[in-house]
Amino acid sequence: MTSHTDDPYYTVLKSKREATRFQILVEIAAHQPSVRQQEIAAKMGVTPQAVSEYIREMVENGFVNSNGRGRYNVTKKGVEWVTTTAETLDTYLKYVTTDVIQEVSVWTAIAKEPIVKGDKVGVFMQGGLLYASKTEQTAMGEVIGAAEPGEDVGVAKLSGIIALEEGIIRVCKVPRIQRGGSHSVSPDRILDALEGMDYIGAVGLEAMVLLKSVGVTEDAFFGAREGVLEASFHGINCAMVIVDEEFTGFLKRLESAGLPYEICDLSIS
């Protein structure tokens, strides 16, 4: 049977002192060998004297080596303790988020058919919206109240994974007015680029005017970047018609978000 002194749950979650030691040891590992005790103290909200005392104890316990003049490094024993504690905390976090929170969380979905309280339903994404149906899906849950088709319904005890593929983002660059604006873009090319796209964003007046010239109204102009990213995350294929000076910055946002995209050349050949 594990004693309290060997149980990471007890030492870190129940003991403020051990939690502080864990954090300081992590900070030393992150910044070794030159460790600034005042910076650690400020970050953790304790005094520099307290940090110094913790480090002194960890040196005595063999968790940290001191090389003088503020130079420290975590020993193998210290690394093993941090790793074991971190892994245990990670396991506990997964237990909380998957077993505990998931059990009490209620997801809002749209009923596909008449549903009554207690029904087992499959939850799935369609057109960027979450639906509940009595057909089996990769994610299943239990309805907490009755609903008619098209009404909102709460689903609890969700298990499994909601099947979802991220939507395609097609990025279409439009020159600023100084470089020709919408007049320098082929109408046929923009119409081809919008084919199969369910959500259209526009950045820049040139982009908006171009869309209007081919009889298309954008779904988002103000906040278009956020709208396109959000729609893509929900599995919707999107087109972003954007002026050239905003083009590179938007691509960087897509890359940082890990979203796939393709670039369309709209220029007149």
Image (cartoon, rainbow, N blue to C red):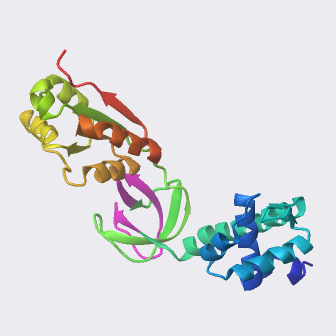
* Residue at the image position 45 percent from the left and 59 percent from the top: 123
* Residue at the image position 41 percent from the left and 72 percent from the top: 154
In depth, the one of 24 and 96 nearer the eye is: 24
Asked whether residue 124 is drawn in magenta, I would say: yes
* Above or below, comparing residue 90 to residue 262 in the picture: below
Residue 266 screen position, x and y as percent: 22, 25
Left or right? Give the position of 105 relative to 60.
left
Residue 127, can we see it?
A: no
Which quadrant of the rendered structure holds the N terminus? bottom right
In depth, the one of 43 and 247 nearer the eye is: 43
Quadrant assignment, res 9: bottom right
Which quadrant of the rendered structure holds the C terminus? top left
* Residue at the image position 27 percent from the left and 41 percent from the top: 246
Residue 101 screen position, x and y as percent: 56, 74
Residue 137 screen position, x and y as percent: 50, 54
Left or right? Give the position of 102 relative to 117.
right
Residue 20, can we see it?
A: yes
Left or right? Give the position of 229 relative to 3.
left
| Magenta extent | 108-131
Residue 162 screen position, x and y as percent: 49, 55
Asked whether residue 212 is drawn in magenta, I would say: no
* Above or below, comparing residue 97 to residue 230 in the picture: below
In depth, the one of 206 and 92 nearer the eye is: 206
Quadrant assignment, res 49: bottom right
In depth, the one of 165 and 38 nearer the eye is: 38
Quadrant assignment, res 18: bottom right
Outermost residue, top direction?
269
Outermost residue, front direction?
69
* Above or below, comparing residue 184 to residue 142 in the picture: above
All told, the count of numbered labels is 0
* Residue at the image position 15 percent from the left and 26 percent from the top: 185
